[in-house]
Amino acid sequence: MALQVHQFLCLSDNFGLLIHDPATGATATIDAPEAGPVLAALADKGWTLTDILVTHHHPDHIQGIPEVKAKFPKARIVGAKADAHRIPGLDVQVAEGDEVTVGSARARVIETPGHTVGHISFHFPDDALLFAGDTLFALGCGRAFEAPAPVLYRSLEKLAALPEETRVYCGHEYTLGNAKFAVTVDPGNIELARRAADISALRSQGQFTLPTTIGLELATNPFLRATDPGVQAAVGMSGKPAEAVFTELRERKNRG
């Protein structure tokens, strides 16, 4: 059986994510934004936590780990070797291309610096799943807090090269705000306009907008479309290098 994914809210807009391998009973949490909802979700599902996969060091992604680990002391904490000094208690330190297992499921570690210098994403190719943390959002991307915008753009290019059917889970429910920005810099994109309307309807009903897919993001996410003539024209940068266009897009979003 394929990996099962359970998604729920933590804090105000963070996503909690559990992944479960029915073949072995192994279960991982992607980050731990808040212990209470993570533990409640595990209890509701009847799953035993075996792994904590950490995307980056920001408090809203790791602050729940100590309490969760106390409840499940055998759970392995897996995170970036580059951030070992900022993620307490790592049991396994990983880098680009390393393999992480959750039961019989196998993930490849993709280093995706930009939002933080040690950010990593977890790609489960056999299940067509990507856990992107705060690097790639539905219709958006994270802020480039710890590295220049071009570094973040190169990380996004790595993720954009994954198979288009890959389902993408992100760290936050930011999609409605991202959609409102996206239509201002890609105004001629009919698929984006349709998607923005769908997102508005989903959020008005309190429904989640994730997962998305790599293919849908390639078609509608302006941060993956810095080479598109329409996007370039909309920001007054026709013919400019993609990294420069991306930097302008990120700066505009920062000011919004």
Image (cartoon, rainbow, N blue to C red):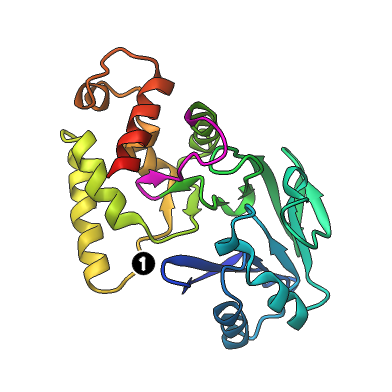
Answer left or right for 167 relative to 64: left
Q: Position of residue 72 (x, y in %)?
A: 76, 79
Q: Position of residue 19 (x, y in %)?
A: 61, 67
Which of 222/56 is in front? 56
Q: Position of residue 143 (x, y in %)?
A: 45, 43
Q: Quadrant of the N terminus?
A: bottom right
Q: Amino acid at mark 1?
A: Phe
What residue range appears in magenta? Answer: 138-149
Answer left or right for 140 relative to 58: left
Q: Residue at x 33, y 55 (%)?
A: 175
Q: Quadrant of residue 92?
A: bottom right
Q: Residue at x 53, y 38 (%)?
A: 159
Q: Residue at x 55, y 50 (%)?
A: 128
Query: Does the magenta-highlighted stretch encompass residue 142?
Result: yes
Q: Quadrant of residue 76?
A: bottom right
Residue extending farthest to the front is 255
Which residue carries the number 1 mark?
Answer: 208
Q: Main secondary structure of the magenta part?
A: loop
Under tag 1, what secondary structure? loop
Q: Is residue 161 visible?
A: yes
Answer left or right for 165 relative to 28: left
Q: Is residue 35 above or below residue 82?
A: below
Query: Does the magenta-highlighted stretch encompass residue 140?
Result: yes
Which of 75/47 is in front? 75
Q: Residue at x 32, y 71 (%)?
A: 207
Q: Quadrant of the C terminus?
A: top left
